């Protein structure tokens, strides 16, 4: 009996160790899967053109060569133009969404009736429609009002495509915020707008910061909307400016990856400052729907 118990306990311990080992291996594999693009980007950007043909593609560079980054910054005028255009558009898009969507989400979550639900469902349908389905009508309409090949037209379209996702996430978060403090404010004579900005909006900080990062990432890296609207070189954003390193004769891999790494820096800095709010914001927004 004692021997059987020991055998059972040993088998259980072995199974537990196997499960733990498999779990660790899965975590390592997933980590490598997500880290490998960054690794490839940085080692290619730090290699000299001569190393690309003589060493293994995944090998570390023989020395840290920053000439690719210097060439992108000093010799590529489109990098500076694209950076300024992307910065202007991203700031405008994020600012508009950060003001409009929290107010709309608050109204939808607190005043539930048939009309409000209908408007909410209409906004949700925007998530289901791919950009390619409306690319041609969008181009025709923007051209009719003189907004084609303008940063204003790009900002309006890009912000419109992000409203649906923002509304879904922020509305679910607002539904988790208790209404007790709002009712107390109404009793003290506070208006709806004052109650929202002084009580509710500060409580929405985690989800607002989360959506700020997501909206920044979507606007900063947007390619399909930009390529359909922005045609001239002086209006190009960073994703379009990178096309200069691609031609019929080939791709300047080192410069392209150096360009790519430079484009990542602003978003990475923003994420490092906002990461402590992101997980709590996403989890809170997913609690109630």
Image: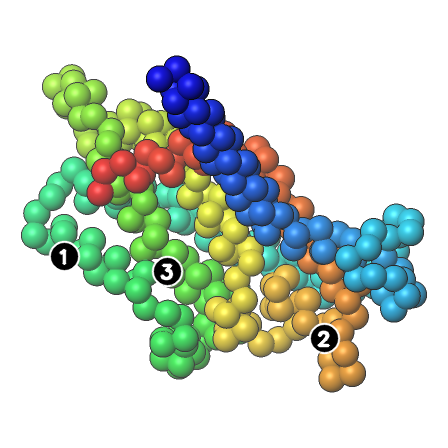
Q: Is residue 6 visible?
A: yes
Q: Which sits in the foreground, 250 or 87?
A: 250
Dividing the picture into quadrants, the one containing residue 86 is: bottom right
Circle 3 SS class: helix
In which quadrant is the C terminus drawn? top left
Residue at 14 percent across and 52 percent down: it is 117
Dividing the picture into quadrants, the one containing residue 203 is: top left
In which quadrant is the N terminus drawn? top left
Figure check: 268 above or below 220? above
Which residue matches tag 3?
160
Residue 6 placement (x, y as % from top left): 43, 19
Figure check: 252 above or below 160? below
Which residue matches tag 2?
246
Q: Which sits in the foreground, 121 or 139?
A: 121
Residue 243 placement (x, y as % from top left): 68, 72
Disc 2 and disc 1: Cα gap in Å? 46 Å
User: In this figure, which colouring scheme has been used for the structure?
Assistant: rainbow
Q: Which sits in the foreground, 192 or 15?
A: 15
Q: Which of disc 3 and disc 1 is earlier in sequence?
A: 1
Dividing the picture into quadrants, the one containing residue 247 is: bottom right
Circle 1 SS class: helix
Which residue matches tag 1?
118
Crowding near the residue tagged with mark 2, few <14, some 14–19, many ≥20 C-alpha atoms within 10 Å: few
């Amino acid at each position: 009996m004692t021997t059987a118990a020991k055998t059972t306990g040993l088998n259980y311990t072995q199974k537990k160790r196997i499960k733990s080992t498999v779990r660790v291996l899965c975590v390592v594999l997933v980590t490598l899967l997500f880290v490998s693009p960054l690794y490839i980007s940085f080692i290619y950007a730090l290699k000299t053109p001569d190393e690309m043909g003589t060493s293994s593609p995944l090998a570390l560079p023989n020395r840290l060569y920053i000439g690719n980054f210097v060439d992108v910054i000093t010799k590529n005028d489109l990098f500076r133009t694209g950076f300024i255009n992307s910065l202007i558009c991203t700031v405008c898009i994020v600012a508009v969404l950060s003001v409009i969507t929290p107010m709309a989400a608050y109204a939808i979550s607190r005043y539930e009736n048939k009309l409000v639900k209908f408007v909410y469902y209409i906004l949700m349908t925007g998530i289901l429609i791919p950009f390619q389905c409306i690319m041609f009508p969008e181009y025709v309409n923007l051209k009719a009002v003189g907004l084609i090949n303008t940063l204003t037209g790009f900002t309006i379209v890009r912000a419109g495509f992000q409203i649906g996702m923002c509304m879904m996430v922020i509305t679910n978060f607002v539904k988790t915020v208790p209404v007790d403090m709002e009712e107390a404010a109404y009793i003290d004579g506070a208006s709806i707008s004052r109650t929202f900005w002084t009580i509710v909006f500060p409580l929405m900080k985690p989800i607002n910061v989360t959506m700020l990062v997501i909206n920044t990432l979507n606007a900063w890296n947007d390619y399909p909307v930009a390529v359909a609207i922005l045609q001239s070189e002086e209006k190009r954003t960073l994703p379009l400016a990178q096309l200069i390193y691609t031609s019929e004769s080939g791709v300047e891999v080192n410069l392209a990856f150096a360009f790519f790494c430079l484009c990542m820096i602003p978003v990475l800095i923003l994420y490092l400052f906002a990461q402590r709010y992101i997980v709590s914001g996403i989890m809170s927004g997913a609690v109630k729907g």
